[in-house]
Amino acid sequence: MFHLHGKLKYFLYPAGVDMRKSFYTLSGIVTSSMKRNVQNGEVFIFVNKRLTTMKILHLEYGGLVIYHKKLESGVFKLPSFDEGLTSHALEWQDLMMIVKNVKPKKRLLKKRQKEASFQLF
């Protein structure tokens, strides 16, 4: 069951995170880098450097839960925040805007190379 709602406190980690991390390593980031406590029932949001994958860490009844969203196309549009912050406080509406307001990723087209001509001997 999905237990996230408007009465919880949300914190976005401002740096890109390796999405191979799971419960213990994300909890370690919360404790050491964000200077917060996972046990307080707050919600912690992590996004990878490319802004294509998001993990949300939350302590619910009985244990930690990770919600994981991976975009097939586009990127998450994060709010602007000051450099050097260890965490950025968000409201429920802000999280919903991040999740729903995915912007298309600009595709860089590569120059085509001329086909090499082959000669048979």
Image: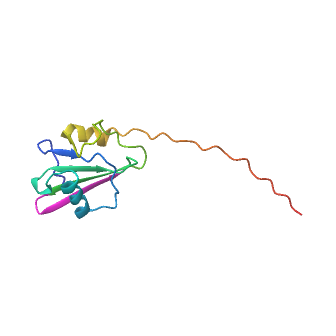
Residue 104 lies, in percent from the top left, at 43, 39
49, 98: nearer the viewer = 49
Q: Residue furthest front?
A: 84
Q: Residue at x 11, y 57 (%)?
A: 39
Q: Is residue 53 left or right of residue 1?
A: right
Splitting the image into 4 quarters, where does residue 88 fall?
top left
In the rendered image, the vertical position of residue 75 relative to residue 19, given as above or below: above
Residue 65 located within the stretch drawn in magenta: yes
Magenta-colored segment: predominant secondary structure: strand
Residue 36 lies, in percent from the top left, at 15, 51
Label count reads 0
In the rendered image, the vertical position of residue 97 relative to residue 55, given as above or below: above
Q: In this picture, which residue range is highlighted in magenta? A: 60-70
47, 60: nearer the viewer = 47
Residue 17 located within the stretch drawn in magenta: no
Q: Residue at x 30, y 43 (%)?
A: 99
Residue 8 lies, in percent from the top left, at 13, 45
Q: Is residue 2 left or right of residue 107?
A: left
Q: Is residue 73 left or right of residue 27?
A: right
Residue 76 lies, in percent from the top left, at 35, 43
Q: Residue at x 29, y 37 (%)?
A: 79
Q: Residue at x 10, y 59 (%)?
A: 61
